[in-house]
Structure formats: C-alpha cells, structure tokens
Image (tube, rainbow, N blue to C red):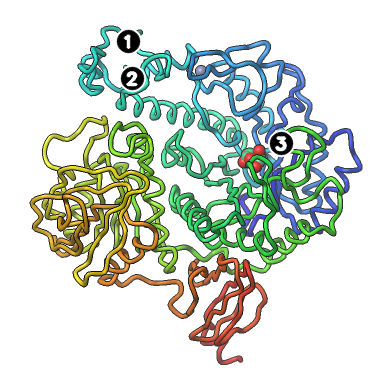
C-alpha cells in the first residue's frame, strides 16, 4: 500500500518551471527538509515538458526529480497533466478547445478549458497517463495520483451538443417523454427532432429549468467519465495507488457526491480571505466545506491546496496574520483532513502566479516569517500521529444536494437569482459548529441513509428526489428530530411542481401545509415572536403555512401575516418534526436551534471547556481542537485537566489563548492520571 499512515505536509511542486536552474532544484530538497515537507504534488501542469511534441515523451527530468525526492523521504502525489494542454495539441486538434456559452470556439491559452467530450483529447490524455503510469507506478513513493486539476466548467461544442442529445435519448427513450418532463408545452417549446436540442445558452434556450438540470447532470456525467478514463489509465499498471481529484468550495458545476464515487480519496483546495473582517463567519464556512468534503466518501480527506500566506487573485490580497497558518491548517485536521498541503512550494519568477504565496519566496530564504510558519505546521503535524486514527463522529446530518442547488439557481421565483441556498445551509451549520456539535452531510441519492442520526436538517429542500420524503417520514416516525424550512418539497427531480399540498408527502409529518412565500426587500424584515414575547428578525423569505395542527412555537410579528405560525413543532410517531417558515440571521438561528436541540442529547466538543464567543471547539475522536477566531486573546476554562497535543503542556483551569491560538486537548486516560 502506497498510501502512508502519516499526516501529509507539502504542496504543489512545479520543477518543470525550473529546469534551467539546477541549483534551485537541489536547494529545494534542502529547504523541504527544513520545512518538514513529506509530500509534494508533482507535475500538475507539466504536459508540455513531458511531451514536448506529439508522441515524444521526455521523462528524464522527472526521473531525476522523483529519485531525488524519494532518496530524501519525500512522498509524491503524482499528477496527470490533463488540466492544461500543450500549444501543439491545441493547434493540431482544435476540437480539444472548448466552446463557450455563445457557442464560440476558444483559442489556445489559459488552463482548465478543454472539451471533456473530445475523443482526441481523451485519447491524448490516456496516452500520456499510460506513459506516466508505466514509468512511475512501480515506485513505492508514489503515494497517489492527482487526476487533472480543479475540474470545472462547461463546453458547448458540436461534440458536446451531440453527446448531450445521446445522453437525453438514453435517459428519456422518446421525445414524447422528454417533452412531457421538460414541460415543453410552455412557449411552444415542443421538440419534434432530437437534433433541435442544443446545450442551454443565452444565445438560445436558457430558462427552462428542467433542461438546465439535465445539462448539469450531463456535465457531471462527462466529468465523471473523464475522471474514470484517467483513473483506469493510471491504475492499469498498479491498482494499489489511490486516486484523488482536487475539489473546490461552494462549487456549482458538477455534483461532487457523484464525482467522489470515481476516486479513492477526496481532496480540496481552500483559500479563505482570513483577516478580512469576520474570521468567525469565514471559519464557519470553511468548517462546513471541510465537513462536506469528509462526507462525500465518509472518510478522511486531504487538504490539497491552501496558501501559506496570501493569494494573488482576490481584489485585496491580505497576508495571513501570525498564528493563522497553524490555526487554519489544524482546522482542516480537526474536521478530518489527513494533510496540510499548500499552493505552492516555490514562487515562480514569471507567469500570473509569481506573487501568489508560496513556502519559498523569490529571496530563496528559509528565515522568513512564512517559511517559519510552514515549518511550524510541519513540526506540529509530525507530533500528531495519534490524531490520525481518530475519526469524526456526527449525530446530526444536514441534507445538502447539488441537484437542489441547480434547481434553486434556475427557479424564477421568490428572490430571483439569489435564493442563497448554500448560505441557508451555512446558517444551520454555523449554529451547530459554534456549539461544538458535529455534522455530516448527505445528498438525496437513493443510497442515502438517515439511520443512526439523531437530528436531520433539511434546509430549503425545494426539490425532493430519491424518495427523500419517505426517508424523512420514517426517520421521524422512529424517533428522530427532523428540521425543515420554507420552500421545501415543491418540485420533483424533473423540476416539475408536485400537484397537491407542499411540502410534498410531509404535510402530516409537519402538521401543516405551506401555501405562499413572501420575498422581502433587502432592507425589510419581519420577526419571529416566541411565546414569552422574545423576538428575532426574519429576512429574505417568509412562507405562510395553513391548516396548522402542529404546536406553534413562534409566530410572525408583522405585516398581513402577523400572528401566523413561523416556527412549529409536530410530534409524529416517536419523533418530532420542526418547520421554520422564515429565515433568521445567524444570531437568531442560534436561538431557534437551541430551542430545537433542547430535547436532544448530542455530544458537544466543548462539554468540558468553558469558552467565550469567537472561540470554537471541534472534536475529532476525542481530540478537542480549541480554535480562537475572535481576533483577540481569549480566556478559556477547562473543567478537567487535559493535555495539549501541540505544546504537550498539561492544562488545568484558566488558560489564555493568543489571537489565532489553537489547542488540541485530550482528556487524561486513567493510566496517565495515575502516572502524574
Ligand atoms: C487553484 C489552482 C492552483 C493555483 C491556486 C492559486 O487552487 O489549483 O493551480 O492556481 O488556485 O490560488
Ligand atoms: Zn465540447
């Protein structure tokens, strides 16, 4: 098995940019050892160097690099170079270039912009992948394959258009069926020949939501089959080397739950703008992304890219403040990462990323602030061996579904073009994360099981698919706590509305039906008023429930629907189903969730740690990661003695955390207590 049982620490290594600088390449190794680097992702954009002309491969330079790395105990995450093609390839085979959403063929340049359908592109990629595998797959230090880079985007070339039609024929069988499920009676859209169907485009049809859903599913399918092709090529020689692709945050192009099935390990690239004002809000979002990444395969993931200092593609490229590199790196570990990898090892001299943060800057020094920060992470990770086998356990499952995301992004209703699905999911997530309550995510696919969770939250599940309403019903019946919201159970997997009361199939479970939804202007708000007259603001969306037999826990405070239920609870079977009609802000959501969770016993990571707001505790199998995102020093109080896995100090009672401070606390085992 090539996949090592250690935390990986390293990053993107692009020696192909430095072949004219042999002294730099030698120095790299010395510096890597100083920085505690034990793995690099190699050759992500090296195609032009590996195959300088069609069919002529040049591996010698890479042989040397591979030898040097392995002699020095540095493992290799070897990339397939498919994310950027050489100029000769584009020139000779223009079909490999993407067509944009105006059906225009792009010119050669940039990256991540090839056609995933093109048989030529697939064949050329398969050939170089095969050659790479033949050359290196026997090597014990190839830890894994890094397929392509950040797959994303669409192509609307004639090949893709034809493949889309074939995909549709396969799915629907007859045009009659497609017309029915795409509701083409609208605007005289009936198709009478498959060839009339084109990819959605502002030049043609762009607003049929059923078509949009199928387009996204088709694009997911093209990407999945491309990844599968690459995987088969590289694993043909040695199937033991696992395969990853690096995913992105808040990504909308493809269904990651589906893509994750094609790979062995999920990895992702995280670039938050730390220090830009509200690190707590930012940390909540990153934590959610980490948990989502872990949930795709229900196992530890890799942080494949992060910056040791800054990026260079945001309008304001702030430096990571002291302490933040360690804190953000260990945040990934807290949520289940088996690595802290960075983009990139060394800043190039030219190209658009010459000023992106890197471990080694243009001065080539190891006594810089950034280098020291990186070396510190390396040292800490090397001491965290026991954490490696600790697993994240969650009692709460949040349903998050890419098809629902696409459905909401195209529905012309309520807050047009701004339904803020991911933000709504984050609202719920944050209220739990702040209290140290662990969360898994699941989508609505057939194989999703809600068994074993105490609480299931289904924010804004506009679409129901995969029998999710049945699963939620059974989950509640058997004693679970179900939380649903406004704008749920309205359309099916074809984006056709259900006929009958909403949320589809759940009105008896919730004890109400949702009749209308009101969209508020940005400056407007309503309120949710509790029985004891406390209230909290509601914004953006307010749904109006009718025929409410559920217990009313809160009502609307104003407008023509003042007094109408805004938060309800319904006993169903042995469980409880909650319904939240309007959208609170993060502060209000915390109050709502406190009320809901008052009846459930859920383990909290901060059970033995008193801490102020701005400090968050996350549990990974008994290791409590205490993280200070408040921007101020903070005092925490431990209710029992614990050992910090970073400093190895025993900590008891009050403890002051610096700005961006982090502790990894573990309770003493009985044996340790006796020895002390
Ligand atoms: C992405 C890419 C990298 C690099 C970084 C810069 O994540 O995968 O190649 O461009 O962004 O932040
Ligand atoms: Zn194409």
Look at the numbered disc 3 and give the secondary structure of its residue.
loop
Of 482 and 29, the residue lying toward us: 482
On the picture, is 195 further left or further right than 236?
Answer: left
Around disc 1, counting alpha carbons within 10 Å, would you say few (fewer than 14), some (14 to 19), or many (20 or more)?
A: some
How packed mark 2 is, by other alpha carbons closer than 10 Å (few <14, some 14-19, many 20 or more), is many
Q: Secondary structure at mark 1?
A: helix
Q: CA distance from mark 3 to mark 2?
A: 37 Å
Question: Residue at left 69%, top 48%?
Answer: 11
In the image, 246: left or right of 505?
Answer: right
The one of 40 and 636 positioned closer to us in this rendering: 636
Which of the labelled discs sits on residue 400, or is there none? none
Evaluate if marks 2 and 1 touch, with contact meaning CB atoms under 8 Å apart.
Answer: yes
**Residue visible at 23% across and 12% down?**
188
Label 3 CA crowd tier, 10 Å (few <14, some 14–19, many 20+):
many
Task: Tell me, for residue 43, which label it has, or none.
Answer: 3
Residue found at x 56% / y 13%: 105
Find residue 148 and report its horizontal and vertical position in percent. 60, 33
- Which comes sooner in the sequence, label 3 or label 2? 3
Give the residue furthest to the right. 23
In primary-sequence order, the first of circles 2 and 1 is 2
Q: Which mark is residue 168?
A: 2
In which image quadrant can residue 118 be found?
A: top right
Horizontal and vertical percent position of residue 28? 83, 48
Quadrant (top left, top right, bottom left, bottom right) of the C terminus: bottom right
Ligand 2 within 8 Å of disc 1? The answer is no
Residue identified by numbered label 1: 194
Q: Is residue 163 above or below residue 216?
A: above
Say if 564 sits above or below 221 in the image: below
Vertical placement of residue 600 versus 523, above or below: below
Quadrant hosting residue 139: top right
* Residue at point 77%, 61% (across, down): 372
């Amino acid at each position: 098995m090539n996949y090592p049982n250690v935390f990986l620490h390293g990053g993107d290594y692009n020696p192909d940019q430095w072949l004219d600088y042999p002294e730099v390449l030698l120095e790299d190794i010395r510096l890597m050892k100083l920085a505690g680097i034990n793995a690099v992702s190699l050759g992500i954009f090296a195609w032009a160097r590996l195959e300088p002309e069609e069919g002529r491969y040049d591996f010698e330079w890479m042989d040397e690099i591979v030898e040097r790395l392995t002699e020095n105990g540095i493992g290799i995450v070897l990339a397939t170079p498919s994310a950027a093609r050489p100029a000769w390839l584009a020139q000779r085979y223009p079909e490999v270039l993407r067509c944009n959403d105006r059906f225009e063929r792009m010119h050669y340049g940039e990256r991540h912009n090839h056609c995933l359908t093109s048989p030529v592109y697939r064949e050329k990629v398969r050939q170089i992948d095969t050659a790479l595998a033949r050359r290196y797959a026997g090597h014990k230090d190839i830890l894994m394959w890094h397929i392509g880079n950040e797959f994303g985007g669409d192509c609307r070339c004639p090949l893709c258009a034809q493949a889309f039609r074939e995909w549709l024929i396969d799915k629907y069988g007859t045009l009659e069926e497609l017309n029915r499920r795409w509701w083409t009676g609208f605007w005289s859209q009936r198709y009478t020949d498959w060839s009339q169907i084109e990819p959605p485009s502002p030049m043609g049809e762009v607003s049929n939501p059923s078509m949009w859903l199928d387009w996204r599913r088709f694009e997911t399918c093209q990407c999945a089959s491309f990844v599968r092709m690459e995987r088969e090529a590289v694993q043909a020689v040695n199937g033991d080397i696992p395969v990853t692709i690096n995913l992105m945050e808040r990504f909308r192009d493809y269904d990651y739950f589906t893509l994750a099935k094609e790979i062995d390990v999920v990895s992702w690239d995280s670039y938050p703008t730390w220090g830009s004002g509200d690190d707590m809000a930012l940390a909540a979002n990153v934590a959610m992304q980490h948990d989502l990444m872990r949930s795709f395969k229900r196992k530890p993931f890799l942080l494949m890219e992060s910056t040791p200092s800054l990026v260079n593609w945001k309008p304001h490229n702030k430096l990571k403040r002291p302490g933040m590199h360690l804190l953000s790196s260990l945040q990934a570990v807290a949520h289940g990462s088996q690595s802290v990898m960075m983009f990139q090892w060394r800043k190039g001299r030219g190209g658009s990323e010459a000023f992106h943060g890197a471990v080694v800057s243009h001065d080539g020094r190891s006594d810089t602030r950034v280098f020291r920060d990186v070396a510190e992470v390396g040292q800490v990770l090397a001491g965290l061996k026991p954490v490696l086998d600790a697993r994240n356990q969650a009692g709460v499952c949040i349903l998050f579904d890419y098809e629902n995301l696409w459905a909401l992004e195209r529905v012309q209703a309520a807050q047009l073009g701004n339904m803020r699905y991911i933000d709504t999911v984050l609202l719920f997530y944050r209220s739990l994360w702040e209290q140290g309550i662990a969360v898994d995510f699941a989508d609505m696919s057939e194989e999703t099981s809600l068994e074993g969770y105490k609480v299931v939250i289904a924010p804004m599940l506009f679409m129901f698919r995969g029998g999710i309403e049945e699963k939620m019903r059974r989950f509640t019946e058997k004693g679970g706590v179900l939380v649903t919201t406004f704008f749920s159970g309205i359309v099916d997997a074809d984006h056709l509305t259900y006929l009958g009361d909403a949320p589809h199939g759940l009105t008896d479970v919730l004890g109400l039906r949702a009749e209308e939804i009101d969209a508020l202007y940005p400056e407007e708000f309503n309120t949710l008023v509790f029985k004891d007259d406390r209230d909290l603001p509601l914004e953006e969306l307010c749904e109006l429930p009718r025929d409410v037999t559920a217990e009313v826990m809160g009502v609307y405070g104003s407008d023509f629907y003042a007094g109408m239920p805004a938060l309800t609870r319904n006993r169903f079977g042995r469980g409880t189903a909650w319904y939240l009609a309007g959208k609170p802000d993060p502060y209000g959501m915390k109050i709502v969730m406190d009320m809901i969770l008052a009846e459930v016993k859920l383990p909290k990571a901060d059970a033995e740690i008193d801490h102020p707001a701005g400090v968050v505790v996350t549990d990974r199998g008994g290791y409590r990661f205490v993280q200070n995102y408040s921007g101020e020093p903070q005092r925490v109080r431990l209710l029992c003695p614990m050992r910090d896995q970073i400093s190895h100090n025993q900590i008891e009672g009050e403890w002051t955390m610096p700005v961006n401070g982090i502790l990894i606390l573990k309770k003493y085992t009985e044996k340790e207590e006796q020895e002390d």
